[in-house]
Amino acid sequence: MCGIIGSTGEGATLNDLLEGLARLEYRGYDSAGVAVARADGTLDRIRAVDGTASLELLAELAKGKSEGYIAGLGHTRWATHGRVTTDNAHPHFDCSGRIGVVHNGIVENFRELKSELEQTGHVFSSQTDTEVIAHLLEDYLKHGSTLKEAVTESISRLRGAMSFVALDADDPKILVATKRMAPLIAGSGSGANFVASDIPAILGKADTFYQIGNDQVVVVSPGDIKLFDLSGNSLELPEIAVEWDLEAAVKGGYPDFMSKEIFEQPAAVRDTLLGRLNSEGEIVLDEMRLNPEELRNINKVFIVGCGTSFHAGMVAKFAIEHWTRIPVELDISSEFRYRDPVLDPQTLVIGVSQSGETLDTMAAMNEASMLSAKTLVVSNVMGSSMARAADAVLYTRAGPEIGVAATKTHTSQIAALLLLALYLAQVRHSIYPSEIADVYSEMIKLPQKIEEVLASDASIEEVAQSMVGIKRFYFIGRQVGYPVALEGALKLKEISYLPAEGYPAGELKHGPIAMIDSDAVVFGIVTRTRLWEKTISNVEEVRVRGAKIVLIANQGDSESEVLGDVIFEVPKTHPLLAPVLDVIPLQLFAYHLAVALGNDVDRPRNLAKTVTVE
Ligand code: M6R
């Protein structure tokens, strides 16, 4: 997956492209590049490869280049086909160097297209799948097509999920873009019009934003944006209501996005819960497009997601089963559709995806729709591909998350999924209204309690700094503590690059305990649930084998505290809400350890925030 941007108009500047790319960096940063056109038809290309600093190098290389550009393309790459080299960096050109393309996604049939194009004389200068697009466009233009027609013909021949933007230096003011199962939006501003992978890339530059659908072609010119289907029919351009401001997309005084986003969790959870209870004390989910009758008929729930979103889904399984008594199955999105799941119209498949664009989850949801299940997506991005395709949507209101490691969207997802569980219970009358009210009143206390956890940031930082040099970490928990353990391990792995494993605490003795010795650090999630005693016994088992013990325990819980070498305290809450609080010390620990190790927490190696490849 990669980030793409294009701009055109008198006010279009190289700087707009560079700023846009900086905000798209979460989509990949193996290399970065721009191609910019002048009115006289000259096309300049600058490309940079420099580890995680490719965008900085690109900005450096672009310094001193005069403005006066009237259109351009920009790209930040997460490599899939072709090694990380300058030749493989986008934008890619055709043989003549007149047609530029930036692309996100994978052209699955690029080998066959490439050999076909080579046989007709095209010369390739990269190992990427993307370059076939530039040469295909070249062919169509040579045979008299306009750029719009050439893009339409080309996307019909390309297989896979992707979006791309093309520019022809012979008519550089016109940018043509298309998408299939990959994110792409357009925007109009006073001085220039834009197309980009997402909204933050052009926030502050465009003032109106538009949705581009799958297999649609958008033609962006200085004064106009037009949308077409693949038959060339003109379509209405759907506007996206954007509530984020520019400030939300920049660091706001924090050293990096990850710390900013960790500290935004009280607001993110508060906003996600806002206005969800009416004056009669009932849960209301305005965006819910499934009616109560349909929800009453559900007899099976599947939850699918990847990474951190999957962990939020694990918490939801406990809540939905407990409050509604509907059986819930959980699956990693990339496994779900290949296991021939048994679904029918009475099955509800819940996809959890902050971006709403993760290809594995999107494909799982499509499979569920095809098998006639009802689908509901929990997403942080209004109008994201999954939000539009699903039968129902529930938005988290965390604001844009830029750091690759998901933090505020995770706690907001759990909050949203708990609301959903209560809502299902309400429409099915499976618990008393008074219990719903009691849980909800605990939920709205969460933002204040998150503030209390965040107040221990400095002491968690000290502990993290004291653990530089530790080589192995284990995280254990039971019931809802288990997804917290997995999430704590994932956060640590992805930004510190250290081996970290999460286990159900009771499972350790079936094998993993063999790895425990005095070099290991074990985090135990021991906040009070009905399984507290059992979890504490599992902590004892690793303590007596010499491991250093860090406990996530409730404030003032002296019985737990005596067992830990280090205690991270969190306030008490309803047991099913506890993951929202318990995960926060683990986020802070992972953050501070990674910073102490000198790692770039916003741009961990080998990762991209939104994974739009299978
Ligand atoms: O956008 P999504 O929620 O669908 O993304 C899913 C995962 O790629 C994501 O949660 C990933 O695991 C996080 N970056 C981990 O911090």
Image (cartoon, rainbow, N blue to C red):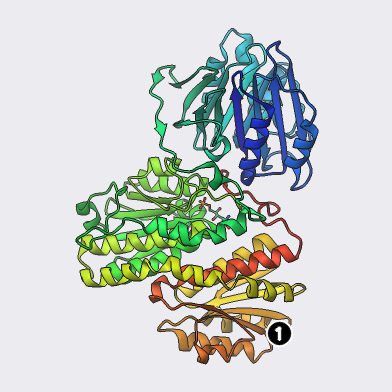
Q: Between residues 614 and 45, which one lies in front from this camera angle?
A: 45
Seen in the image, is 160 located left or right of residue 601?
left
Which residue: 65% across, 44% down? 28
In this rendering, is residue 172 above or below 608? Answer: above
> Which secondary structure, mark 1?
loop
Q: Between residues 605 and 238, which one lies in front from this camera angle?
A: 238
The N terminus, quarter of image: top right
Total numbered badges shown on the rendered structure: 1
Q: Quadrant of residue 284?
A: bottom left
In this rendering, is residue 461 above or below 307? Answer: below
Q: Residue 325: in sight, yes or no?
A: no
Seen in the image, is 461 located left or right of residue 557?
right
Q: Between residues 117 and 597, which one lies in front from this camera angle?
A: 597
Q: Quadrant of residue 237?
A: top left
| Residue 446 rendering spot, x and y as whole percentages | 42, 68
Q: Residue 396: in sight, yes or no?
A: yes
| Residue 367 rendering spot, x and y as whole percentages | 41, 46
| Residue 560 rendering spot, x and y as whole percentages | 53, 88
Q: Which residue is mark 1?
A: 517
| Residue 283 rendering spot, x and y as whole percentages | 27, 59
Q: Quadrant of residue 348?
A: bottom left
Which residue: 69% across, 74% down? 462
Which residue: 44% across, 68% down? 448
Which residue: 41% across, 55% down? 271
Amino acid at pointer 1: Asp
